[in-house]
Amino acid sequence: MQQTVRGNVPLHRTVTKRRGRISISMILMYIVLTAWSFTTIYPMFWVINNSFKVSRDVMNNSFAISWHPVMTNYTTAFDRINIGKSYMNSLIMSGSVVILVLLVGGLAAYVLSRFQFRGRRWIYSILYASLLIPAFATVVPVYDLLIRWGLVNTHLGLILPQTAGNLTFAILVLAGYMATIPKDLEEAAFIDGCNRWSLFTRIFFPVARPAFASTSIFVFLWSYNDLFSALIFVNKENVRPIVALLSEISSQYGTDFGLMAAAVSLTVVPVLIVYLFIQKYIEKGLTEGAVKG
């Protein structure tokens, strides 16, 4: 029995040709992604590699692999510049910002996405318009409020401004995701006896977990790397986050590039840990955890 032909070309040749095209496209895609990954991985490797060299070796041959690593830079970072204290300050502040943004932003997004009320469109317009306001324009009034409340050079002095600055992004992202959740799921929860709080914690939060995870990653990175706010609102050593500490190493220790590389390496580690911990939630399905059985 002869194979079916498409035009004058046998079917098996068409299938083989398509498979060939798919394999070539996949190869090209992996080549491009691999080349792109090196632009990100190599700079990080370069910094970590130089952190195990003394400053003289970093200056003379910074691209050579450190075959005989030394831990001097790391011991100096913890003993002389107290990087551990700045580490804890950054984790406390950024972690608190993420929790407050997800809690307040999640509740606000739930109201905006599931309720119809007068002024709802105006609220959306104000939220979108607030994204156009640069952070520099709000520094003076925010700093004045923090002085009146006695929060300058405290953890709350950085947590509250960063929470307010990230709320708009979180609300818009979470509201857009929650708006896609079927109303049948909400009605079934009401029939089972859920109130509004239970509906949010047991239904909407598990269903919208990918959106919450993505939002938390961006909020943590923006808060953790916010050097501008850290230099203005918390400039004392006892509450100084790690990004502010990095800005002082070059002026305080001049040419110690090995110490700078070690400090940068220690700064990147928590970001990678948070991302690796949360990324599994992004890859899960839309309704994972919402319906059991």
Image (tube, rainbow, N blue to C red):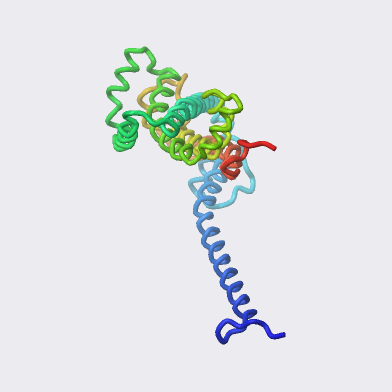
Q: In the rendered image of this protein, does residue 20 appear above or below residue 26?
A: below
Q: Is residue 214 visible?
A: yes
Tell me: 197 left or right of 229. Answer: right
Please identify the residue farthest to the bottom as the structure is shown.
8
Q: In the rendered image of this protein, does residue 21 appear above or below residue 263?
A: below
Q: In the rendered image of this protein, does residue 242 appear above or below residue 15?
A: above
**Image quarter of residue 150:** top left
Please identify the residue farthest to the front as the structure is shown.
191
Which residue occupies the foreground of this view, 94 or 206? 206
Residue at 49 percent across and 26 percent down: it is 103
**Image quarter of residue 145:** top left
Q: In the rendered image of this protein, does residue 57 appear above or below residue 234?
A: below
Which residue occupies the foreground of this view, 119 or 48? 119
Which residue occupies the foreground of this view, 170 or 13? 13
**Count of all numbered marks drawn on residues in the image:** 0
Image location of residue 164, percent across then percent down? 39, 27
Image location of residue 120, percent across then percent down? 34, 31
Image location of residue 113, percent across then percent down? 43, 34
Image location of residue 288, percent across then percent down? 61, 40
Residue at 31 percent across and 29 percent down: it is 119
Q: Is residue 81 visible?
A: no
Which residue occupies the foreground of this view, 105 or 51? 105
